[in-house]
Image: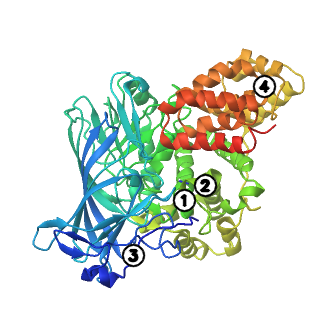
């Protein structure tokens, strides 16, 4: 989602030495005989196919994973083993390098040609702050199967453990994963790169009162007994591995779709997402068959750090989109769209993230248009483009091209959101406009079929588009126009523009009030959608007199709203304007919600003053136990940056 200078210790040992099992001063003896202790991989990013992974998928690849795990809530730990079925691409290669983060490696064994399992020598390198530790396993026999026994840290970056008090039901603990971008390595040692796709099976044990789910073939009628088996027959990249455990029940939304959630949330979620079968049918009509069997949605506790995560067969979703009026169900359209763009055709590296998110945002918008009308689809596009204009600054031009250069992303989670989502979708909308919807739909459907179950880079997309769009329909788009979107910062002058009559009415109402007139009449605002309220607030000045904010609040009850999209715009405006009457509600909102998109704007506004910084620290201390590690890291960084400036901007 979102270049590292690495220093790794370890003696350089040639491949021939590992294969031969030569003796060295640091060699260890295993059941397989004397073997050299394998060295940590080379530090150079340029030598690695993916700069954010230690793996060497050009030499050896994982084809299948078999997990045996136990869920231990008391220890906040997953423990067990993972068995890899390997494809040795280089017949002279004799080591397997895996990505890990904060894992305890207890044992490594390999299956010999005779079927016997013997110990394999391995070394865990010192940890890099972002990438974790490379686990290098000497495999001179190039074992077809290797097994690693391990356990996770209670602080694993890809897992969150919630006490019963942090859940809606207050009775059963909860655990869930978030593997994207490179957090899978914190709960499974593997080749944590999108360049590798694998199938997997899993056997998971847990307390008997807990239902366990994975991004695999979850049975809606599964018996809750603490013993669960899963299979994912389609090959997926590591960031799409997912697991969750808690007090979860199932509600169907269609013959091949449904909702998993805590018992009190499940009926509300099923009602909100009732259009899921229509979304699936729309996407299939446009882009070809849904290839993943079932499509279910797991509604997580509010601490989930994102809006949604497109884990195949089981989208993880935030409860903050359940508003009772379907105004935010475009999130489901987005995660479903990933079944084609992202899960089926996957970006090769984090630098190509727009191939996932830009394509998906475009497909999402098409689904929304088909089901809820062009007007709503256009409003959502306008909001995204306005956010892009605000996010694109002279300081981040290096992250504005769709094709980000190697070394720019220090952390793969640091992609500029507006680049990979809004600019990517805008580019595809440009192509649709130039080539015509019918031709562009046929192109996209062919693209998804052509690259199905592959991981590709921006250059591969560009070559495919040249052959199947630019050359096929000459005179529509020049190569220079096409390349400007991919390789230049900002938005090209050729970008198609959108207008929204409903937003025009909102603009007029806001301007009339700002110019000294009356607030928009209830007869007008009672018909406004979430999108219109978002646009109304976003168009306000940077600050307003507190008496004017009080008038808005009295009329529309923004403070304390249950709508997170409105809250994430209103509270920063309140903070910037010194409207302290909202502080109590702000504290409650930040403590209750862990979705980064919704809370980070308010934290960012708070830390701009010494008083706000103190309040932010106070709120965070209370909220931290319920935050996901990814969210905690973001908040702590904002607070640390403010302190580094001297206690916040004066």
Determine crowd level at label 1: few under 14, some 14-19, many 20+ residues with C-alpha closer than 10 A. Answer: many
From mark 1 to mark 3, how far is it between C-alphas?
21 Å
* Mark nearer the N terminus (2 vs 4): 2
Residue 154: x and y in percent read 38, 41
Of circles 2 and 4, the one toward us is 4
Asked if disc 2 and disc 3 are in contact, CB closer than 8 Å, the reply is no
* Mark nearer the N terminus (1 vs 4): 1
From mark 1 to mark 4, how far is it between C-alphas?
38 Å
Q: Residue furthest front?
A: 25
Left or right, 65 with reference to 639: left
At numbered mark 3, what does the secondary structure look like: helix, strand or loop? loop
The disc placed on residue 353 is 1
From mark 4 to mark 3, how far is it between C-alphas?
56 Å
Determine crowd level at label 4: few under 14, some 14-19, many 20+ residues with C-alpha closer than 10 A. Answer: some
From mark 2 to mark 3, how far is it between C-alphas?
32 Å
* Mark nearer the N terminus (2 vs 3): 3
The disc placed on residue 425 is 2
């Amino acid at each position: 989602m979102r270049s590292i200078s690495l220093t790794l210790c370890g003696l350089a040992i040639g491949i021939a030495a590992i294969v031969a099992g030569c003796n060295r001063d640091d060699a260890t003896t295993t059941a397989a005989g004397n073997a050299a202790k394998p060295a940590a991989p080379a530090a150079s990013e340029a030598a690695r196919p993916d700069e954010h992974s230690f793996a060497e998928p050009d030499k050896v690849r994982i084809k299948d994973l078999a997990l045996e795990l136990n869920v231990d809530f008391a220890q906040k730990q997953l423990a067990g083993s993972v068995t890899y079925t390997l494809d040795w691409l280089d017949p002279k290669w004799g080591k397997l390098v895996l990505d890990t983060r904060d894992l305890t490696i207890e044992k490594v064994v390999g299956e010999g040609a005779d079927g016997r399992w013997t110990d394999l020598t391995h070394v865990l390198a010192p940890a890099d702050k972002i990438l974790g530790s490379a686990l290098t396993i000497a495999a001179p026999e190039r074992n077809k199967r290797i097994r690693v026994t391990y356990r996770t840290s209670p602080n694993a970056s890809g897992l969150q453990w919630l006490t019963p008090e942090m859940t809606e039901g207050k009775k059963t603990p909860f655990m869930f994963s978030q593997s994207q971008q490179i957090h899978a390595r914190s709960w499974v040692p593997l080749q944590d790169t999108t360049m590798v796709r694998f199938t997997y099976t899993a056997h998971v044990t847990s307390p008997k009162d807990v239902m366990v789910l994975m991004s695999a073939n979850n049975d809606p009628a599964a018996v809750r007994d603490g013993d669960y088996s899963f299979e994912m027959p389609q090959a997926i990249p590591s960031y799409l591995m997912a697991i969750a455990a808690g007090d979860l029940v199932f509600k169907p939304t269609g013959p091949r779709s449904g909702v998993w959630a805590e018992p009190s949330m499940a009926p509300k979620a099923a009602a909100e997402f009732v259009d899921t079968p229509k979304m699936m049918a729309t996407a299939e009509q446009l882009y070809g068959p849904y290839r993943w069997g079932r499509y279910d949605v797991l509604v997580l506790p509010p601490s989930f750090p994102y809006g949604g995560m497109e884990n195949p067969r089981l989208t993880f979703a935030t409860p903050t989109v359940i508003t009772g009026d379907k105004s935010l169900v475009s999130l489901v359209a987005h995660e479903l769209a990933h079944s084609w763009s992202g899960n089926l055709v996957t970006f090769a590296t984090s630098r190509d993230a727009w191939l996932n998110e830009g394509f998906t945002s475009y497909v999402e918008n098409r689904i929304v248009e088909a089901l809820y009308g062009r007007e709503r689809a256009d409003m959502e596009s306008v909001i995204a483009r306005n956010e892009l204009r605000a996010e694109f600054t002279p300081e981040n031009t290096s992250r504005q091209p769709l094709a980000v250069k190697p070394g720019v992303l220090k952390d793969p989670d640091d992609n500029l959101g507006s680049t990979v989502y809004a600019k990517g979708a805008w580019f595809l909308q440009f192509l649709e406009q130039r080539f015509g919807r019918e031709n562009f739909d046929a192109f996209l459907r062919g693209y998804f079929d052509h690259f199905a179950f592959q991981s590709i880079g921006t250059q591969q997309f560009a070559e495919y588009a040249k052959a199947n769009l630019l050359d096929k329909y000459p005179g529509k788009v020049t190569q220079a126009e096409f390349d400007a979107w991919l390789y230049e910062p900002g938005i090209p002058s050729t970008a198609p523009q959108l207008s929204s009559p409903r937003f025009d009415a909102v603009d007029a109402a806001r301007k009339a009030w700002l110019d000294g007139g009356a607030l928009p009449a209830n007869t007008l605002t009672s018909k406004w959608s979430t999108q219109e309220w978002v646009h109304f607030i976003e168009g306000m000045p940077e600050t307003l007199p507190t008496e004017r904010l009080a008038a808005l609040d009295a009329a529309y009850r923004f403070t304390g709203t249950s709508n997170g999209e409105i809250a994430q715009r209103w509270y920063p405006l309140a903070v910037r304007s010194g409207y302290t009457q909202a502080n109590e509600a702000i504290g409650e909102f930040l403590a209750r919600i862990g979705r980064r998109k919704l809370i980070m704007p308010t934290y960012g506004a708070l830390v701009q003053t010494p008083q706000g910084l103190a309040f932010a620290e106070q709120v965070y201390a209370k909220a931290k136990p319920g935050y996901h590690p990814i969210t905690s890291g973001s908040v702590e960084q904002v607070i640390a940056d403010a302190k580094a400036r001297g206690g916040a901007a004066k």
